[in-house]
């Protein structure tokens, strides 16, 4: 299997080769008349994820992220292409695969709504046939790391969103899955809960080598957890590579904020750097994120009465938005009428 760099990935755990998913949608167009359309939710996507990787999978609403996750778990069957997880075809051997994967859907719980949290875990203990000693060891470890001890006897319906999310993550890991799919795991969480979940995922990946595929709208999740990111839009893979390369692909810019001793005309910066804003003695200069700030800083320090300066990193969300705009097709992209 070939990775994005062109090297063979012998330890690939997740493999997609030109996978697509097409839905038939019927739309009313008049009295007693309907038109059938095919909506291509995933369009010939190919990628591999190696064992132990933590990969961000991002895109706007309707891009095809959740559809991809559902095909990886066997919930949906691909319309075309080849898909394997640990050498298993998810749609054909869903039960067998279930023992090797964990799934967390941020907006839907896998816990029993009216039961105390601990009862959901006991049921999963039996469902997955987890050996008693391993179940107790995993439960104790997860309860400690996710701070769940005070919540075990609380019915799931009484938990806050952040508490339930931590409970869902623990439930997904009780049976020692080799891969964890996370679909919006920090949605609606407060800052403290987000930090706790991120710390746990980082430790899980580092210490246990669990493969993680993370979909999220919170780009801080990606920045803090993933070294590799895949960007999907209209069902197509737009980018697959290191996080740093995303800035180059989106032609992002860093900002140098300069505080001078006094108000002066705009700094004469060497191209491609340029002054984008001036407020009194403070000036903002933009320059390509792929370039070092050192030459620009050295020149300003040598030629201007400098008091202080700082470099602000580019906003990844703005980078991705620009990529979407550049690749946007017509409104009917991904659909075609069917007679």
Image: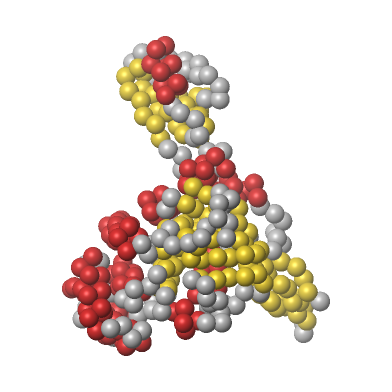
Residue at 49% from the left image edge and 47% from the top image edge? 242
Foreground residue, 146 or 317?
146
Work out whether 224 lies above or below 65. above
Quick one: which residue is furthest to the right in this view? 339
Work out whether 236 lies above or below 259. below
Residue at 50% from the left image edge and 34% from the top image edge? 290
Image position of 267 (left or right of 124): right
Foreground residue, 308 or 105?
105
Residue at 52% from the left image edge and 75% from the top image edge? 88
Foreground residue, 290 or 330?
290
Image position of 37 (left or right of 48): right
Work out whether 238 lies above or below 307. below
Q: Position of residue 80 (x, y in %)?
A: 67, 72
Quarter-of-image position of residue 338? bottom right
Q: Position of residue 23 (x, y in %)?
A: 66, 75
Image quarter in which the N terminus is found: bottom right
Image quarter in which the C terminus is found: bottom right
Quarter-of-image position of residue 188? bottom left
Does residue 112 appear in this view? no
């Amino acid at each position: 299997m070939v990775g994005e760099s062109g090297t063979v990935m012998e330890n690939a755990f997740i493999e997609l080769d030109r996978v697509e998913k097409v839905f038939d949608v019927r739309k009313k167009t008049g009295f007693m008349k309907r038109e059938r359309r095919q909506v291509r939710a995933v369009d010939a996507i190919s990628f591999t994820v190696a064992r132990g990787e933590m990969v961000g999978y991002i895109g706007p609403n309707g891009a095809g992220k959740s559809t991809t996750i559902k095909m990886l778990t066997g919930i949906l069957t691909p319309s075309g292409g080849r898909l394997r997880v640990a050498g298993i075809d998810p749609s054909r051997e869903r039960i067998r695969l279930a023992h090797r994967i964990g799934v967390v859907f941020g907006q839907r719980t896998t816990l029993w709504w009216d039961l105390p949290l601990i009862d959901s875990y006991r049921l999963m203990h039996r469902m997955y046939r987890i050996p008693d000693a391993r179940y107790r060891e995993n439960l104790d470890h997860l309860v400690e790391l996710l701070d769940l001890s005070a919540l075990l006897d609380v019915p799931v319906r009484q938990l806050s969103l952040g508490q339930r999310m931590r409970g869902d993550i623990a439930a997904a890991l009780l049976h020692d899955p080799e891969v964890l799919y996370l679909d919006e795991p920090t949605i609606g969480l407060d800052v403290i809960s987000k930090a706790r979940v991120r710390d746990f995922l980082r430790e899980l990946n580092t210490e246990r080598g669990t493969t993680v595929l993370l979909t999220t709208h919170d780009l801080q999740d990606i920045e803090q957890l993933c070294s590799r990111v895949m960007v999907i839009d209209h069902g197509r893979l737009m980018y697959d590579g290191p996080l740093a390369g995303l800035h180059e692909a989106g032609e992002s810019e860093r900002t140098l904020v300069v505080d001078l001793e006094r108000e002066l005309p705009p700094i004469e910066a060497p191209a491609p750097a340029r002054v984008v804003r001036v407020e009194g003695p403070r000036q903002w200069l933009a320059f390509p994120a792929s370039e070092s700030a050192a030459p620009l800083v050295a020149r300003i320090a040598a030629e201007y009465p400098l008091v202080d300066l700082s470099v602000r990193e580019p906003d990844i969300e703005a980078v991705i938005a620009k990529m979407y705009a550049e690749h946007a097709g017509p409104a009917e992209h991904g659909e075609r009428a069917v007679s």
